[in-house]
């Protein structure tokens, strides 16, 4: 091996970043996923560049490349890394490091179907009251999705496409309210009750989960159609608009 090649190889080896030793690894939890990526079940990643101080706390973090684009992976990855902790020699601080944070989509939830008794008039009336109370300050699904997805920050053409799809696919608020009312009435019917109890039962969390499970109107088909349209218009891997054949 020539002297030049030997020196070049040693220099390259010396320039490699030391292996990171984590005390608390930056592993995404369900709440860390950007809403649009979570709802459309799109995988992605983001690079993050930081320094670690003497306590191993990531500081001065910034996002690098993220794919797909416009998913919010950049900010999500930075927040995740900032919560992590490194094991470093305090004498080396501040230490520069970089990491690629992967986000793997979750399996779509199974749609539940109600096969219990049909609610009677008293249960339907109680369901209406419950839905009114639950949705007093609720905006329509279209606006809830647009807000969660930060649609206002998307490029103009993408924003117009997504809002157009939401206009077509998302049900109006009145229809949502009727669906919630039926879900609440079915919760009573399957328990053989005519009214919601004045005080919360010990298994109230089960009641709360059952109301959306028993609703006739489901969000999953809407999100599935949105995913199909989004991924047909925008590459769900690179984030770029596909070339026209």
Image (cartoon, grey):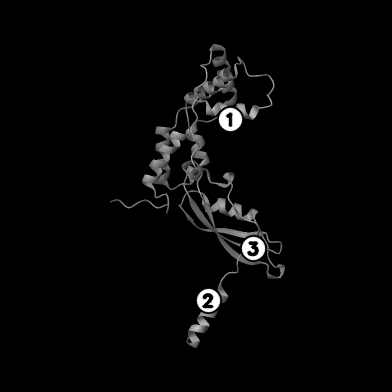
Front position in the image: 169 or 216: 216
Q: Are marks 1 and 2 in contact (CB under 8 Å)?
A: no
Question: Which mark is drawn over residue 21?
Answer: 3
**Rendered view: 52 above or below 181:** below
> Mark 2 packing: few (<14 Cα in 10 Å), some, or many (20+)?
few
Label 2 vs label 3: CA separation?
21 Å
Instruction: Please give the label number shown on residue 58.
Output: none
Return the disc, 1 or 2, that comes first in the chain's sequence: 2
Q: CA distance from mark 1 to mark 2?
A: 56 Å
x, y percent for residue 175: 47, 24
Q: Nearer the viewer, residue 245 or 207?
A: 207
Please state which of residues 106 and 160 is positioned toward the viewer in this rendering.
106
Q: Secondary structure at mark 2?
A: helix
Disc 2 target residue: 12
Furthest residue toward top: 121
Q: What crowding class fits label 3: few (fewer than 14 Cα within 10 Å), some (14-19), or many (20 or more)? A: few
Q: Earlier in the sequence, mark 3 or mark 1?
A: 3
Q: Which residue is painted at 58% across and 54% down in the image?
A: 78
Secondary-structure class at tag 1: helix
Q: Is residue 161 above or below residue 69?
A: above
Question: In this orientation, does residue 55 appear?
Answer: yes
Residue 48 lies in quadrant: bottom right
**Residue at figure coordinates x 56%, y 26% from the top left:** 211
Instruction: Say whether disc 2 or disc 3 marks the residue closer to the N-terminus.
Output: 2
Residue 187 pos. (x, y %): 57, 22
- Tag shown at residue 209: 1
Q: Position of residue 147 (x, y in %)?
A: 52, 39
The residues bearing labels 3 and 1 have C-alpha atoms spaced at a distance of: 40 Å
């Amino acid at each position: 091996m020539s002297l030049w090649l030997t020196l070049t190889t040693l220099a390259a080896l010396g320039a490699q970043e030391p292996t990171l030793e984590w005390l608390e690894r930056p592993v995404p939890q369900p709440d860390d996923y950007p809403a649009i990526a979570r709802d459309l079940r799109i995988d992605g990643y983001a690079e993050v560049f930081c320094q670690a101080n003497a306590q191993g706390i990531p500081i001065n973090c910034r996002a690098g490349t993220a794919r797909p684009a416009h998913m919010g992976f950049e900010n999500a990855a930075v927040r995740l890394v900032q919560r992590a902790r490194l094991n470093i020699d305090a004498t080396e601080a501040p230490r520069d490091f970089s990491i690629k944070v992967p986000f793997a989509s979750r399996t779509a939830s199974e749609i539940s179907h109600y096969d219990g008794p049909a609610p009677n008039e008293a249960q339907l009336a109680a369901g209406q009251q419950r839905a009114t109370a639950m949705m007093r300050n609720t905006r329509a699904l279209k606006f809830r999705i647009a807000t969660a997805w930060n649609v206002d920050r998307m490029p103009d053409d993408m924003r117009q496409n997504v809002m157009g799809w939401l206009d077509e696919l998302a049900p109006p608020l009145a229809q949502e309210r009727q669906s919630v009312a039926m879900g609440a009435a079915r919760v009573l019917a399957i328990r053989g009750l005519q009214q919601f109890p004045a005080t919360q039962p010990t298994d109230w969390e089960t009641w709360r989960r059952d109301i959306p499970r028993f609703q006739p109107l489901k969000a999953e088909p809407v999100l599935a159609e949105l995913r199909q349209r989004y991924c047909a218009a925008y590459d769900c891997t690179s984030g770029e608009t596909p070339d026209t054949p």
